[in-house]
């Protein structure tokens, strides 16, 4: 029988998000493809330093070592390298003892098309164009920003999400952007019992929630948090939406416009996903951050109507 990923949480990650490939990428940008290929081959036995998503991947894969999580998490490498130049990456994976066995080396092309082929719930990359392609195909994706790492010694994986345009659609954000806070608040009060449509990260959150349900609540190795600029009374629609989806979030922070960085650090987030670049850059001073280029805020930035 063929191998199936049914019931698994599947994460796809680029080689530059997993490892620090700044040296070889600089060679590629300054000297071209042939020089890059030669560099990678000459250095294929040199172990790469961890990249910005390395700790996150370690914690995800550690879930497989627990009785309730055995075999429930799959991490797949998606790379623009060829299999030849990618040998350095797999040598480094072996060095760190990461149980990553599946990969797609796209030979200079974007590997985004393999996200759907593998059925991945999330794609993490340092290439914004690849991330955009995956989001447009209907899958969760984020551009990992270089920045702080907030680690707690308890081994629990902590993932934080923004709400609008990430977990939820940007329908309410559109009102805020066009008509301001007062109109947004009135709309949310009026629509409090009307669930929001799902955003690009809803399926990932659902898969994460399914994995959490495999564990007793008191010993679950995953904690999730909503960290949103919303405040009362705009909180009610969010609460009722999650109830309608039958999805539990462990913590919900309704900040009413306060900066999120200190709260993410207090939560101990291993990664935070937000649709606004500025929020991600601010958060990255405290925790690893993933920019989700989706929704009206990003359309405005790119000059789209």
Image (tube, rainbow, N blue to C red):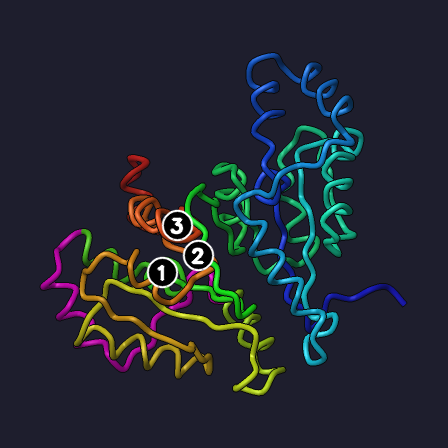
Q: Which residues are magenta?
A: 178-203
Secondary structure of residue under mark 3: loop
Q: Nearer the viewer, mark 3 or mark 2?
A: 2
Going from N to C along the chain, the mark reached first, 3 or 2, is: 2
User: Which residue does the numbered mark 1 point to in the structure image?
Assistant: 265
User: Which residue does the numbered mark 3 point to in the structure image?
Assistant: 294
Going from N to C along the chain, the mark reached first, 3 or 1, is: 1
Vertically, is 202 above or below 215? Answer: above
Q: Quadrant of residue 165?
A: bottom left
Is 196 one of the magenta-colored residues?
yes
- Where residue 202 sits: x, y (%)? 47, 66
User: Residue at (52%, 37%) from the top-left corner?
Assistant: 127
Proximity of marks 2 and 1: CB atoms separated by less than 8 Å = yes
Numbered mark located on residue 150 in the image: 2
Q: Is residue 286 left or right of residue 131?
A: left
User: Residue at (36%, 52%) from the top-left corner?
Assistant: 286
Secondary structure of residue under mark 2: loop
What is the C-alpha distance between the residues marked 3 and 1?
24 Å
Q: Which of the two residues, 176 or 148, is positioned nearer the viewer here?
A: 148
Q: Which of the two residues, 183 or 74, is positioned nearer the viewer here?
A: 74
User: Residue at (62%, 39%) from the top-left corner?
Assistant: 49
Specify the farthest residue to the front: 153
């Amino acid at each position: 029988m063929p191998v199936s990923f049914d019931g698994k949480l599947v994460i796809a990650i680029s080689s530059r998000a997993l490892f620090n490939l700044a040296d070889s990428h600089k060679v590629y940008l300054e000297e071209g493809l042939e020089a890059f290929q030669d560099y990678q081959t000459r250095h294929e036995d040199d172990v790469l330093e961890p990249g910005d998503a390395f700790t996150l991947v370690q914690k995800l894969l550690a879930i497989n070592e627990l009785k309730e999580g055995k075999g429930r998490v799959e991490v797949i490498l998606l790379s623009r390298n060829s299999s030849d130049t990618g040998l350095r990456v797999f040598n480094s994976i072996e060095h760190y003892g990461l149980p990553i066995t599946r990969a797609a080396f796209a030979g200079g092309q974007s590997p985004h098309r393999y996200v759907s082929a593998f059925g991945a719930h999330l794609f993490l990359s340092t290439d914004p164009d690849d991330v955009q392609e995956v989001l447009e195909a209907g899958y969760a994706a984020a551009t990992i920003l270089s920045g702080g790492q907030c680690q707690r010694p308890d081994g629990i994986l902590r993932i934080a999400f923004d709400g609008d345009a990430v977990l939820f659609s940007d329908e309410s954000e559109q009102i805020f952007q066009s008509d301001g806070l007062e109109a947004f608040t009135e709309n949310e009060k009026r629509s409090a019992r009307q669930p929001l449509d799902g955003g690009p990260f809803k399926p990932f959150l659902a898969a994460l929630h399914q994995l959490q349900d495999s564990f007793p609540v008191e010993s679950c190795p995953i904690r999730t948090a909503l960290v949103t600029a919303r405040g009362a009374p705009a909180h009610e629609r969010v609460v009722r939406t999650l109830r309608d989806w039958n999805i539990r979030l462990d913590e919900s922070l309704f900040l009413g416009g306060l900066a999120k960085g200190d709260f993410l650090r207090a939560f101990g987030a291993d990664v935070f996903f937000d649709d606004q670049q500025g929020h991600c850059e601010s958060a990255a001073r405290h925790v690893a951050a993933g920019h989700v280029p989706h929704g009206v805020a990003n359309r405005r930035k790119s000059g789209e109507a």
